Structure formats: structure tokens, C-alpha cells
Amino acid sequence: MWAILSRNRDAGILLLRIWLGVVFLWVHGAPTLLDDDVLGRWQFHGTQMGLWGISWPAPKFWGFLSMLVHTGGIVLFILGLLFRPSCLLLAIVMAVAATYEFSTKRTFSAGLREASHAIELGLVFLAMMFIGPGKYSIDRE
């Protein structure tokens, strides 16, 4: 049984890309694109760059780029197109989100509890950057 699974490694990578991508798009991407106050959401996401000492250009610009990565980057991830660059950008967005969650809490354990989701997703995207999209992708190697 394990040999069958080993021979279908690329099917497992495809399953991970589709499942993680669709859920990420639903939970993170769609709200940054379809929110009633989309400019306010972009402002909120963009101000988080200030935690890294980046305040220029305007926060809405960074929020817009965050929205592009949350939506376009994850679609590229699902399709396996420009896979590694999109994984890198998604990991960076998750690092910014984790930094924000840590900065809003008073204790390390509370910060870790709040940031764990972003850290876990960031590590998955980082690992996928090394693993690659598999043979069932547009970028097939």
C-alpha cells in the first residue's frame, strides 16, 4: 500500500495545492478583494509593513500588493504557474501577518497563539517552494 502512495507523490502535491489554495482563497483572498470597505482593508494590511520599518509608499499600496498576493498568488499556486515566486510572496505575506499578531499581544505565548496560523501557512509555502509544484502543474519541470 505504501508503495502505491510513493508512486503517486505528485497527486499528493496536487491535492495539497488545490485544497490549501481554495481554502486560502476563500478565507484570506476573497475578503481582501470583496470586502465592503476594501480600501480600509488595504489600509489595514498596508500599515502592517510599518512593523518592518517600511512606511513608503502609502499603506494602501502595500495593502493592494497584499491583496494581489492573497488572490493572484494563490491562484498561481493552485495552477502551478510561476509556482516558486508565488510561494515566496505568500510566505512573505504570512511573515508580515505573524509579525502583526506578535506585536499586538502582551505576552510571548499569547502572540504565538495568535500568530501560529500565519507561521504554519508561511512554513508550508516556504517548504512548497523547495518541493516544487509536481508534474501536475502548468510549470511542469
Image: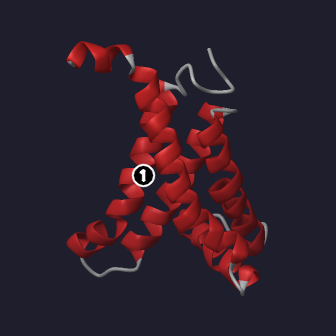
Asked if residue 123 lies left or right of residue 80, the reply is left
Amino acid at dot 1: Leu
Spot occupied by residue 140 in the image (x, y as percentages of width and height): 63, 19
Q: As displayed, is residue 141 above or below residue 120?
A: above
Q: Quadrant of the C terminus?
A: top right
Q: Quadrant of the N terminus?
A: top left
Q: Quadrant of residue 32?
A: bottom right
Q: As displayed, is residue 125 above or below residue 60?
A: above
Spot occupied by residue 108 in the image (x, y as percentages of width and height): 24, 70
Spot occupied by residue 64 in the image (x, y as percentages of width and height): 75, 66
Q: What residue do we see at 62% from left, 79% from top?
A: 44
Asked if residue 9 lies left or right of residue 23, the reply is left
Kindly tell me whether residue 56 is visible in this rendering: no
Kindly tell me whether residue 132 is visible in this rendering: yes
Q: As displayed, is residue 127 above or below residue 28?
A: above
In the image, 42 versus 28, the foreground residue is 28
Q: As displayed, is residue 76 above or below residue 134?
A: below
In the image, 27 versus 6, the foreground residue is 6
Q: What residue do we see at 46% from left, 23% from top?
A: 10
Q: Quadrant of residue 87?
A: top right
Q: What residue do we see at 39% from left, 21% from top?
A: 9
Secondary element type, mark 1? helix
Spot occupied by residue 47 in the image (x, y as percentages of width and height): 63, 75
Q: Quadrant of residue 99?
A: bottom left
Q: Which residue is mark 1?
A: 121
Q: How is the image coloured?
A: secondary structure
